[in-house]
């Protein structure tokens, strides 16, 4: 495949949460290839170091647990010192751990919300003032088509991901007057290493292919390309909306 080059992303400061592996790592690589100044947050020190070594001086990272909002704020502050104020924020970090609805406790529910939703708002709250000062920016929240498809087996995850769309819409309204765009990218079943290791059995893949309009499985790079578009000036009038990367599987 041949992909587009976005001149407006060259030199732009980009923050990515959950950037060490899976979709996040592909997003980090894609921005680095565009000449952006990329900083990512992750809890996995080994994966973060490996990606940083692969990219050399094209990306920097900070280790933090996004469930700890103060730690996340400190990590974002460190990225600001290293690569400048955020012009693009990609709220990517999440985990789709399976769980039985009958066994969910209040503590587990709250922890899943912290992993999959809460940090997104506080990351926006942290970087938006700098975007306002600079005259605009792009915020991209990672959703999921799991709840659109009425997928079962992870109610806390699906509920958090559904709420991401509400977060996007309300923040697009609040920040739009400052020329800050807020959008949601909605991946389908993306073939990350984690998915392949845990759930992508031949039977499950065949059932999923039958739900998609397109026959090909979706790779992380396809999500990254949508994120690049929404971060670029090509998407200058795109905000408050969902951008699907799910091969027509809804």
Image: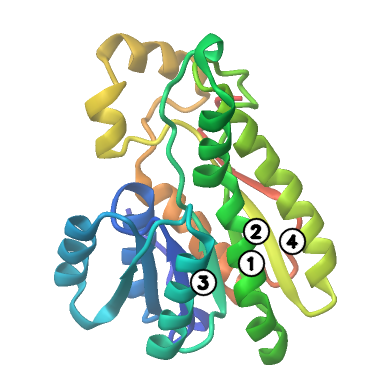
Task: Tell us which disc is closer to us: 4 or 2.
Answer: 2
How far from the left and from the top, in percent, is residue 188? 49, 33
Q: Nearer the viewer, residue 126 or 6?
A: 126
Q: Position of residue 174 (x, y in %)?
A: 83, 67
The residue wearing badge 4 is: 239
Q: Which residue is mark 2?
A: 121
Mark 4 / mark 3, whichever is N-terminal: 3
Are the residues flagged by discs 4 and 3 in contact, CB closer than 8 Å? no
Where, by quadrant of the figure, is residue 152 drawn?
top right
Question: In what element is the residue under mark 4?
Answer: loop
Q: Which residue is mark 1?
A: 124
Q: 10 Å neighbourhood of mark 1: few (<14), some, or many (≥20)?
A: some
Q: Nearer the viewer, residue 236 or 46?
A: 46
Q: Quadrant of residue 122?
A: bottom right
| Front of the two marks 3 and 2 | 3
Spatial separation of the CA atoms under disc 2 and disc 1: 5 Å
Q: Which residue is mark 3?
A: 73
Q: In the rendered image of this protein, does residue 236 appear above or below residue 11?
A: above
Q: Are marks 2 and 1 in contact (CB under 8 Å)?
A: yes
First in sequence: mark 3 vs mark 2: 3
Position of residue 125 measured from the top left corner of the image (x, y, whole percent):
67, 69
Query: Residue at 17% of width from left, 57% of height from top?
Result: 46
Q: Nearer the viewer, mark 1 or mark 4?
A: 1
Q: CA distance from mark 1 to mark 4?
A: 15 Å
């Amino acid at each position: 495949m041949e992909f587009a080059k976005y001149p407006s992303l060259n030199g732009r400061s980009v923050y990515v949460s959950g950037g060490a592996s899976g979709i996040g790592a592909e997003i980090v690589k894609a921005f680095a290839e565009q000449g952006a100044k990329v900083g990512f947050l992750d809890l996995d020190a080994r994966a973060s170091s490996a990606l940083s070594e692969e990219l050399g001086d094209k990306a920097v990272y900070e280790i933090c647990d996004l469930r700890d909002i103060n730690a996340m704020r400190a990590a974002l502050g460190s990225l600001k010192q290293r690569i400048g104020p955020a012009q693009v924020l990609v709220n990517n970090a999440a985990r789709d751990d399976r769980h039985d609805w009958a066994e969910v406790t209040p503590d587990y529910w709250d922890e899943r919300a912290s992993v999959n939703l809460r940090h997104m708002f506080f990351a926006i709250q942290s970087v938006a003032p700098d975007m306002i000062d600079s005259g605009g920016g792009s915020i991209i929240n990672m959703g999921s088509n799991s709840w659109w498809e009425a997928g079962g087996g992870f109610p806390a995850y699906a509920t958090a991901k559904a709420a991401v769309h509400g977060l996007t819409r309300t923040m697009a309204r609040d920040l739009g007057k400052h020329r800050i765009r807020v959008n949601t990218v909605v991946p389908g079943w993306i073939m990350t290493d984690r998915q392949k290791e845990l759930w992508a059995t031949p039977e499950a893949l065949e059932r999923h292919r039958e739900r998609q309009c397109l026959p090909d499985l979706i790779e992380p790079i396809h999500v990254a390309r949508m994120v690049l578009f929404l971060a670029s000036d090509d998407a200058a009038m795109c905000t408050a909306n969902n951008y699907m990367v799910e091969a027509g599987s809804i």
